[in-house]
Image: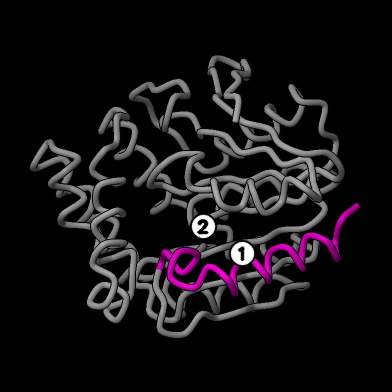
Amino acid sequence: MKEMEARVDRYTLRYVEEGQGPAVVLIHGLAGDLGAWTAQLALLAPHFRVVAFDNRGAGRSTQVDEPVSTRDLAADTLGLMDHLGIARAQVVGRSMGGAIAQHMALMAPQRVASLVLCASFARLDPLGRRVLSNMREALEWRGSWADHARHSVQNFVSAGFFNTHPEQVAAIERLLGGETRLPACYSRQNEACQAHDTSGELARITQPALVMAGGADPICSPTATRILGEGLPNARTEMFDDASHFFLMEQPERFNRLLLDWLQRHAA
């Protein structure tokens, strides 16, 4: 994949683009960067024009220690769509990416054809807030991405997966521990997730929405999933039992099947 750059307002966003056809925009979460979508880029490129990018403050996009909100990141994403000449797209968001996607639908509903919200939230519940706070504090106290990963990895996969897939868990830990972003940018986006609350506005998001979540996710728990799925007027919810925040990696076949089917049925 050839990586490219777009200037959006004061920020440079790194992105990749694959395939042709109706547009699909993939938004990663608080952890990681556009590499989170490697498998989905390969899955979707034969059918769609697929764009994945690094949010500001992540990956190789601009990193500045400054306040940021999920609404700000939604404006960035719409700006990237402008840069690429994409008038309308289906938007797929993981975790924080799903929060960003909700703001896109609120800010510019005509530009969002459908939503896929993966392990996401309209607002976090107390458990999710505590987990995010603990992960931020581990990074700030230790000052080490490797230590942050060691303290955090168990939040992303289920107990069963952690115990039976040690090699994959170690790979996730290496991925999290290999971050190169400014720790301050992670802290700012962690705070943005905690401040995000669209629960009172979900009724205005009328696009078809597929909500997918792990039944054992402590970050975006079944409580948070229920708030999101019941608040959206045109939503379908799919739970991944015995899976956690990274259910996309725990049960990839089911996830990819549901994603491709949804996007094909709602393609503009």
Q: How is the image coloured?
A: one colour
In the depicted view, which residue is nearer to us: 196 or 93?
93
Question: Left or right of 212: which side holds 177?
Answer: left
Identify the magenta region.
245-268
Q: Is residue 146 above or below residue 129?
A: above
Return the residue at label 1.
200
Say left or right for 203 vs 171. Answer: right
Split into 4 quadrants, where in the image is the N terminus? top right
Residue 248, magenta (yes or no): yes
* Distance (Cα) linking label 1 and label 2: 8 Å
Q: Is residue 120 above or below residue 28?
A: below
**Residue 197: which numbered mark, if any?**
2
Q: Secondary structure at mark 1?
A: loop
Q: Residue 213's x, y, as percent?
A: 52, 73
Q: Using the image, tell me which numbered label, if any, was put on residue 223.
A: none
Q: Is residue 49 depicted above or below 233 in this figure?
A: above
What residue is rendered at 30% in x and 71% in y? 127
Q: In the image, what residue type sits under mark 1?
A: Gly
- Is 162 magenta? The answer is no
Answer above or below: position of 261 versus 153.
below
The single residue placed furthest to the right in the displayed view is 268
User: CB of mark 1 within 8 Å of CB of mark 2?
Assistant: yes
46 to the left or right of 63:
right
Residue 122, by quadrant, is: bottom right
> Which residue ends up furthest to the bottom in the rendered image?
241
